[in-house]
Image (cartoon, rainbow, N blue to C red):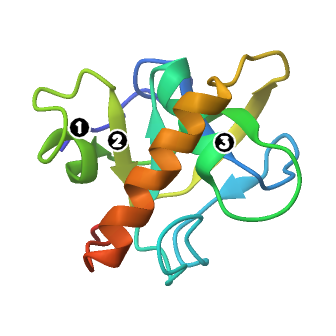
Amino acid sequence: MKTNNNKDNPGTPPFYHGTKADLNLDDLIAPGFSSNYGQRKQAAYVYLTATMDAAVWGAELALGEGPGRIYIVQLTGPYEDDPNLTDKKFPGNPTKSYRTKHPLRVIGEVVVWQGHSPEQLKAMKEGLERLKELGIDAIED
C-alpha cells in the first residue's frame, strides 16, 4: 500500500478521477456511494489514475447523465494499485490506476480533453457487456 506523508503534496500528482458527476473545488469523492460502473452497488473504494487516458475512459464509461468530466484530485490517505486492471489486464500497472478507501479532494478540473473514437468507445462498451453477460463484474471490491 502506498501512503501519503506530505499533506501539502500527497502522492505524486497529478492524479485524476473520471466521472459524470458535477463536482466543485474542495468537494470530496468518497467511498460509500453507488458505483459509476457494474451493478452500481455501494462502492468500497474510490478509483483514481495518474494517466489522462485512463481518466478519459472513466469519464466516458461512467453511468449517468451529462457529459463526462475529469477532475484533478488530491489523496487524503493511503492508496493501492487497482486490482481490477493491474492483476487482470495490465500487469505492472502501466495505466497507473489506483484505488483508496479514503476520500479524494477535488482540486481542479481538466476542461479540455479528447475522448476516444466512437469505434474505440463502442468496442470497449461491447467488451464490458460481454463480460456482464458472462457474470463477470467489472469492479472487484
Gap between marks 1 and 3 measured at Cα:
25 Å
Residue at 41% x, 18% y: name it: 12
Towards the viewer: 90 or 12: 90
User: Where residue 112 appears, x then y in whole percent?
Assistant: 83, 15
For label 2, count other residues whose C-alpha is less than 10 Å away and answer few (under 14), some (14-19) or many (20+): many
Query: Looking at the rendering, in which quadrant would you find the N terminus?
Result: top left
Judged left or right of residue 10, residue 110 is right
Asked which quadrant contains residue 109, the reply is top right
Residue at 85% x, 62% y: name it: 65
The amino acid beneath tag 1 is Lys
Residue 15 makes an appearance in the image? yes
Mark 2 / mark 1, whichever is N-terminal: 1
Judged left or right of residue 117, residue 100 is left
Which numbered dot is residue 2?
A: 1
Q: Label 2, on which residue?
A: 98
Residue at 32% x, 72% y: name it: 137
Which numbered dot is residue 59?
A: 3
